[in-house]
Image: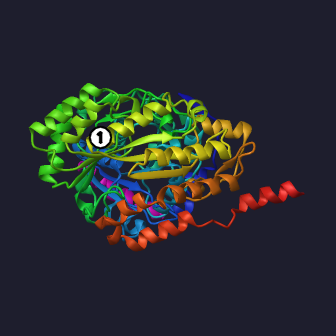
């Protein structure tokens, strides 16, 4: 464990003017030490520039499940779909511990939620998720410097979360004073040996403990607790889904981790070790989704589902043998093109697979090599060809504005997308997420055009950085050109308009089309400042 002298004023932790406010909640806890812990898990709302689909947060579903197995009473507050104010929800439920997840564009809203909670209730607040896990940029400490955040969980959360809950419960059972200040009292040493966390003691010092090993046995985890979500308020998984009820759309993880280290990928900050569930274990959860929850669509959220093809063959055989292949399913985040051979993909099609995504990224061989994708264009071509031969829909993920790009290389990507002709082409402008190699490269060689984490929001139609001759204007121009060139062709238009989902969501589709195809004229304050400095 390393301690850092980042002292914060003592009154940040527990102001004298708030003592009376905290008395009632602590008295309630004193009368209930023998009952189950009350746990709240929060998914913060964050700004999106377009309407988007909303699905249950699978990470919180797992945390809720392990907490319930521990014996806790759990509530999930998904701010994207909740109508009740958060402070009112907290007052009513009176949790013993609160967990908040945060990716990069969410993190400031997570801080606001934490402050909102602490204003009405004295409770330990734990922050987790991809963003605060980036220790290379001290983003764990960045969150801990927020007055209302007490603990940060780094990396996979389930084992660490249960360890935290066990320690808090034991402390409450044995101590007369178990306010947050007491729980975080450095003299108590409650967190000294808790792996996988960074934390702030009540004297204001910040600490970073050793990492917790990745979970080796994924079969030991309970199934995600979907019953904790208001399923009727969610949408289906993807735009290609044809009029499926959102309450019957579920996700599943069959493996975790990714052995590849693509320079742009935010998953590179998570455990590198790839681990999988056994096919038999996956089958039982699959059966639960189809039989008990009446799933009409299932999304596999693995980052690298086909690392071991033998395992997928076995899972496909089980789905077919158990008559579970009538419910369509998809690889949401994509699979490796170099492992998508005819035998595997035809077997998966028989097992119910409807569509799969591939991370193509670029159509230029030199740019493809530079991002450490460890694949070539011909292999990608073959994967798309195989999928079309066996009757699978495909989605291609393409990035406009990778480091080193020129107008010509971005043209290569557009031409390659048209050549592959996936059912859906998803173009995005390169976003340098903290912790990635691209982020470090841009800091050294480029110029970041965003300084606020909330500007890292998905689907924002503006360039995030400039490097060399690659200007923001060029990237934004090529981004819009990519969408126009790909979608304003007869075959993609026909594929979309013949689906029920297109017409059921026509207003939303028109808004997205207008925002995507039409030039974005406004400039950020940072962009204006940079241009003014360049002219002075």
Dominant SS type (magenta): helix
Q: Does 258 sit left or right of 262 as displayed?
A: left
Of residues 277 and 168, the one nearer the viewer is 277
Q: Which residue is at the front of the view, 501 or 333?
A: 501
Mark 1 sits on what residue? 389
Check residue 35 for magenta coloring. Answer: yes
Left or right: 226 with respect to 199? left
Residue at position x 29%, y 32% in the image: 342
Q: How many discs mark residues in the rendered view?
A: 1
What secondary structure is found at the residue carrying circle 1?
Answer: helix
Q: Is residue 367 magenta?
A: no
Q: Which segment is the magenta one? A: 20-36
Query: For this view, does 12 lie left or right of residue 396?
Result: right
**Quadrant of the rendered structure where residue 341 is?**
top left
Q: Residue at x 36, y 29 (%)?
A: 339
- Extreme right residue here? 536
- Looking at the picture, does residue 533 appear above or below residue 69? below
Direction left: furthest residue: 322
- Split into 4 quadrants, where in the image is the C terminus? bottom right
Looking at this view, is 476 or 199 the one in front?
A: 476
Q: Name the image quarter holding residue 52.
A: bottom left
**Residue 181 percent coordinates (x, y):** 49, 48
Question: How packed is label 1: few (under 14 Cα within 10 Å), some, or many (20 or more)?
Answer: few
Q: Residue at x 27, y 64 (%)?
A: 243
Residue 70, image quadrant: top left
Percent position (x, y) of residue 157? 38, 39
User: Do we see residue 395 in this rendering?
Assistant: yes
Q: Position of residue 345 (x, y in %)?
A: 28, 36
């Amino acid at each position: 464990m390393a301690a850092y002298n980042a002292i914060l004023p003592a009154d940040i932790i527990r102001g004298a003017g708030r003592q009376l406010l905290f008395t009632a909640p602590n008295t309630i806890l004193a009368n209930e030490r023998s009952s189950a812990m009350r746990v709240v898990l929060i998914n913060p709302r964050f700004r999106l520039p377009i309407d988007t689909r909303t699905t249950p947060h699978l990470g919180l579903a797992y945390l809720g499940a392990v907490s319930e197995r521990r014996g806790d009473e759990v509530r999930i507050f998904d701010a994207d779909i909740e109508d009740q104010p958060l402070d009112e929800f907290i007052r009513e439920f009176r949790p013993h511990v609160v967990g908040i997840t945060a990716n990069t564009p969410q993190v400031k809203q997570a801080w606001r939620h934490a402050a909102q909670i602490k204003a009405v209730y004295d409770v330990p607040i734990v922050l987790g998720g991809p963003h605060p896990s980036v220790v290379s940029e001290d983003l764990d400490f960045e969150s801990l410097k927020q007055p209302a955040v007490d603990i940060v969980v780094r990396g996979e959360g389930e084992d660490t979360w249960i360890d935290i809950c066990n320690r808090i419960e034991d402390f409450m059972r044995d101590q007369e004073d178990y306010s947050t200040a007491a729980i975080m009292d450095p003299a108590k040493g409650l967190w000294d040996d808790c792996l996988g966390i960074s934390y702030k003691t009540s004297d204001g010092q910040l600490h970073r403990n050793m990492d917790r090993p990745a979970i080796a046995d994924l079969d030991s985890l309970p199934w995600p607790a979907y019953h904790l979500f208001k399923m009727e308020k969610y949408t289906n998984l993807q735009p290609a889904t044809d009029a499926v009820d959102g309450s019957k759309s579920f996700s599943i993880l069959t493996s975790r981790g990714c052995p590849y280290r693509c320079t742009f990928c935010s998953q590179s900050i998570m455990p590198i070790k790839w681990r999988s569930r056994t096919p038999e274990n996956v089958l039982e959860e699959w059966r639960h989704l189809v039989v008990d929850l009446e799933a009409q669509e299932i999304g596999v959220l693995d980052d690298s589902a086909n690392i071991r093809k033998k395992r997928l063959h076995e899972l496909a055989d089980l789905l077919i043998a158990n008559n579970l292949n009538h419910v369509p399913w998809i690889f949401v985040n994509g699979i490796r093109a170099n492992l998508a051979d005819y035998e595997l993909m035809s077997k998966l099609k028989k097992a119910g697979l409807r569509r799969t995504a591939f991370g193509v990224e670029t159509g230029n061989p030199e740019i493809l090599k530079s991002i450490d994708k460890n694949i070539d264009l011909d292999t990608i071509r073959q994967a798309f060809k195989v999928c079309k031969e066996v009757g699978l829909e495909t989605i291609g993920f393409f990035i406009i504005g990778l480091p080193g790009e020129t107008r010509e290389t971005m043209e290569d990507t557009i031409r390659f997308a048209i050549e592959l002709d996936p059912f859906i082409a998803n173009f995005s402008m390169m976003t340098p997420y903290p912790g990635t190699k691209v982020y470090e490269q841009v800091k050294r060689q480029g110029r970041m055009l965003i300084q606020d984490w909330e500007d890292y929001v998905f689907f924002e139609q503006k360039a995030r950085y400039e490097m060399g001759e690659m200007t923001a204007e060029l990237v934004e121009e090529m981004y819009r050109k990519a969408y126009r060139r790909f979608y304003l062709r007869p075959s993609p238009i026909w594929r979309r308009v013949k689906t029920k989902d297109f017409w059921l969501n026509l207003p939303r589709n028109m808004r997205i089309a207008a925002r995507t195809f039409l030039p974005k004229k406004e400039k950020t304050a940072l962009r204006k400042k940079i241009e003014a400095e360049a002219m002075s």
